[in-house]
Image (tube, rainbow, N blue to C red):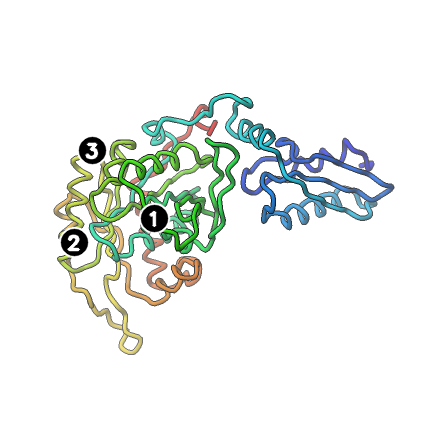
């Protein structure tokens, strides 16, 4: 293949923006191309200044050009930044519209036709709901599904740290947000928008509005599962989700003791009253396996999850043992299903993911639904 502008652009068409999953040529990110003998300089306009993906583009561009053109000399990759108008044009392309047109955001009630939406709920805090959400999402990804997480616990956000990615999302325009990604799972959180130590001080209506924006303004793509890490209890956010997303599936996380499971029963009762389906109970910290005797020790009691599931007409889909590695993985952003895949906890999360896929399979997409 001769070294020409047209040939180079055709090769660059295979280079994708890893956040937008589109060709940099199709997105008009290649702003200049210079050929000096056998040396080539490619100028790429990034969506935002200081984008952390520079190294990715440098490697991918150089590798593909050297593979296509053995005679090529130096490959220089330079970077600029898009203007607001250029970002708006990119947003229109990824939405499938035209610049200046209204964003093609679906109504929240229509999202269940696109994704299997599962709320992960609990009656009280401290039972490991967010830990369960993260590990269940990553386990579903390991099973081959495309998964996203909405951190709906606006006040107590924790998903960015647990996923090991504190980056800010790329905002292409007022109605187009690119989710953050880690371990193959896309996610969005209030913690992706503010510093970790910054409190969110809002009244109830603002919380519902943010959840709605997370649902409709984020470029989720062709997900199979969208998990919602709900705040504990039966407050504003769970109620808003029930109203915005009728017939959402719910998984309830509890610990074994009766005090936790009885509080969690209120969440299950709320779900049933709002036409949501409780597809299962996950019992976290169910038991501890002693290193010396290898026996199960029920530190927090036994039977709470079974009683809860029976009262709600559902099943216990997993019993997660108490392991230090689970806590450590959440602190450092390495979920136990990745960091310690052979551990009892990781295997329990994987079994839970398999059961979820059985009782709540992802919807079948039509071509019309693939526009998002």
User: From the viewer's perspective, is residue 76 above or below residue 117?
Assistant: below
Disc 3, SS = loop
| Percent of width and height locating residue 369 | 43, 26
User: From the viewer's perspective, is residue 197 above or below residue 216?
Assistant: below
| Percent of width and height locating residue 187 | 43, 45
Q: Residues within 10 Å of mark 1 (few under 14, many from 20)?
A: some
Question: Is residue 201 something one can see in this rendering?
Answer: yes
For mark 3, what is the residue?
275
For mark 1, what is the residue?
354
| Percent of width and height locating residue 31 | 70, 34
Task: Calculate the distance from the C-alpha at mark 1 to the C-alpha at mark 3.
Answer: 24 Å
Q: Is residue 138 left or right of residue 50?
A: left
Is there a contact, CB below 8 Å, between mark 1 and mark 3? no
For mark 2, what is the residue?
261
Nearer to me, 367 or 220:
220
Q: Is residue 165 left or right of residue 200?
A: right
Q: Residues within 10 Å of mark 3 (few under 14, many from 20)?
A: some
- Mark before the other along the chain sequence, 1 or 2: 2
Viewer-side label of 1, 2: 2
Task: Calculate the distance from the C-alpha at mark 2 to the C-alpha at mark 3.
Answer: 21 Å
The N terminus appears in which quarter of the rendering? top right
Residue at horizontal 40 percent and vertical 49 percent from the top:
191
Viewer-side label of 1, 3: 3
Residue at horizontal 68 percent and vertical 39 percent from the top:
44
């Amino acid at each position: 293949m001769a070294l020409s502008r047209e040939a180079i652009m055709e090769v660059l068409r295979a280079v994708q923006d890893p956040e937008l999953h589109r060709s940099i040529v199709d997105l008009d990110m290649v702003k200049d191309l210079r050929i000096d003998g056998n040396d080539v300089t490619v100028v790429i306009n990034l969506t935002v200044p200081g984008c952390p993906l520079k190294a990715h583009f440098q490697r991918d561009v150089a590798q593909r050009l050297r593979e296509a053109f053995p005679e090529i000399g130096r490959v220089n990759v330079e970077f600029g930044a898009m203007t607001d108008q250029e970002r708006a044009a990119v947003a229109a392309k990824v939405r499938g519209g035209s610049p200046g047109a209204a964003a093609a955001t679906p109504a929240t009630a229509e999202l269940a036709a696109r994704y299997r939406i599962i709320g992960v709920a609990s009656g009280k805090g401290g039972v490991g709901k967010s830990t369960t959400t993260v590990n269940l999402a990553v386990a579903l990804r390991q099973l081959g599904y495309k998964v996203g997480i909405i951190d709906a616990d606006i006040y107590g956000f924790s998903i960015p740290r647990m996923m090991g990615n504190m980056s800010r999302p790329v905002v292409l325009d007022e109605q187009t947000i690119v989710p953050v990604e880690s371990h193959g799972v896309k996610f969005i959180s209030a913690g992706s928008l503010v510093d970790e130590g910054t409190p969110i001080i809002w009244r109830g209506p603002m919380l519902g509005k943010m959840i709605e924006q997370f649902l409709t303004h984020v470029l989720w793509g062709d997900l199979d599962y969208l998990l919602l890490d709900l705040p504990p209890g039966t407050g504003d956010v769970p109620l808003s989700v029930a109203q915005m997303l009728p017939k959402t599936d719910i998984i309830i996380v509890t610990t074994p003791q009766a005090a936790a499971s009885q509080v969690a029963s209120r969440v299950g009762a709320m779900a049933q009253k709002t036409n949501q389906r409780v597809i299962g109970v996950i019992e976290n910290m169910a038991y501890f396996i002693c290193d010396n005797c290898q026996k199960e020790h029920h530190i927090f009691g036994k039977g709470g999850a079974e009683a809860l599931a029976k009262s709600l007409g559902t099943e216990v889909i997993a019993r997660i043992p108490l392991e230090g590695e689970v806590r450590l993985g959440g602190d450092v952003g390495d979920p136990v299903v990745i960091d310690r895949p052979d551990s009892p906890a990781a295997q329990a999360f994987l079994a839970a993911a398999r059961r979820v896929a059985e009782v709540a399979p992802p919807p079948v997409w039509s071509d019309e639904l693939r526009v998002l």
